[in-house]
Image (cartoon, grey):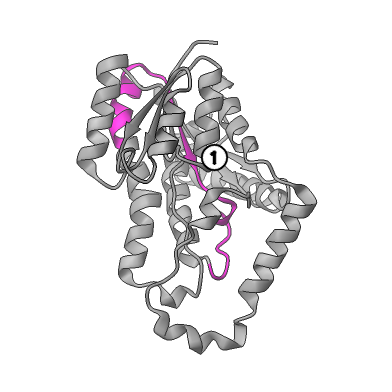
Amino acid sequence: MSKKVVLITGTNSGFGWLTARSVAALGHKVYATIRDTEGKNSDKAKALAQVENVTVLDVSLTDETSVKKAIDTIIAKEGTIDVLVNNAGAAMFGVAESSTTGDVQRMFDVNVIAPWRLIKLVLPFMRKQAEGLIINVSSGWGRFSVPFSVVYGASKFALEGLSEGLHYELRPLGVDVVIIQPGAFPTEMSQKIQVGSDTSVVDDYKAIADVPNKMFTAIGQIFETTNPDPQDVAEAVINLINLPKGQRPLRTVVDPATGEFIKTANDAVKVEYAKALTAFGMEELLA
């Protein structure tokens, strides 16, 4: 297996932390982005930087200059970027109407615009070598919009929209764009869930106020029953890296509890999507 230059975002915890360490353990050169490495994330940054084959970069993904500087640094040292893993993300939970325009903007800045910013910057190098892999970490809720996670789901829908079209558009050029759809996992992200800023409307939803609690209870039961392991997401990334160019599936579901729901929906959409491309004269992109 050839060693690759891999850029992974959101590596201070959760999926990103595990993925960076797992990919580096295979001998790949990993560049791991963490925000505020001299401040609140300094301990995590120092710990990850001690891992063999890992270089930590202080990057604010919503800052164009910061991201461009990171890409320039990698290119100056390595000459290219073979794999991009857009893992960093933010979550929001609560009554959708409580989300202000600013709340929605911030969610899309992290979950959609930031991945696109990176995709746009790495593509010229991947196209030049006619080979590359972009892995966008979405969610099962990027397939179904779940009540009380509407804004989060909408941002993941958008990320999936970017990924799905690019998958077919870039594959003839040697670049694979794929999606990982994790289910619910016990990671630090669940402790950093944002809520809407407009709390004035929450009281008007008293009729369904107990529904979120039921959801959290159900998720807790899922964790007890299935004991989901976040390392499974890191292993899914490794599997996609190892697969031959052009043979990587568009979507990979990593969800031991409710993943079959997502897989069934994905399979149905894949069939109809192929019909749509054919109807619009683009069937050659399906090959």
- Label 1: few (<14), some (14–19) or many (≥20) C-alpha neighbours in 10 Å: many
On the question of residue 107 being in view, the answer is: yes
Residue at position x 36%, y 64% in the image: 104
User: x, y (%) of residue 40?
Assistant: 37, 46
Instruction: Identify the residue position indicated by label 1 in the image.
Output: 15
In the rendered image, residue 180 lying in the magenta stretch gets the answer no
Image position of 67 (left or right of 239)? left
On the question of residue 245 being in view, the answer is: no
Q: Considering depth in this image, is 8 or 188 the residue closer to the camera?
A: 188
Image position of 243 (left or right of 71)? right
Q: What residue type is labelled 1?
A: Phe
Residue at position x 65%, y 45% in the image: 267
Would you identify the image quadrant in which residue 31 lies?
top left
Residue at position x 50%, y 10% in the image: 2
User: x, y (%) of residue 196?
Assistant: 42, 71
Q: In the image, which residues are magenta?
A: 120-148
- Secondary structure category for the residue under label 1: helix
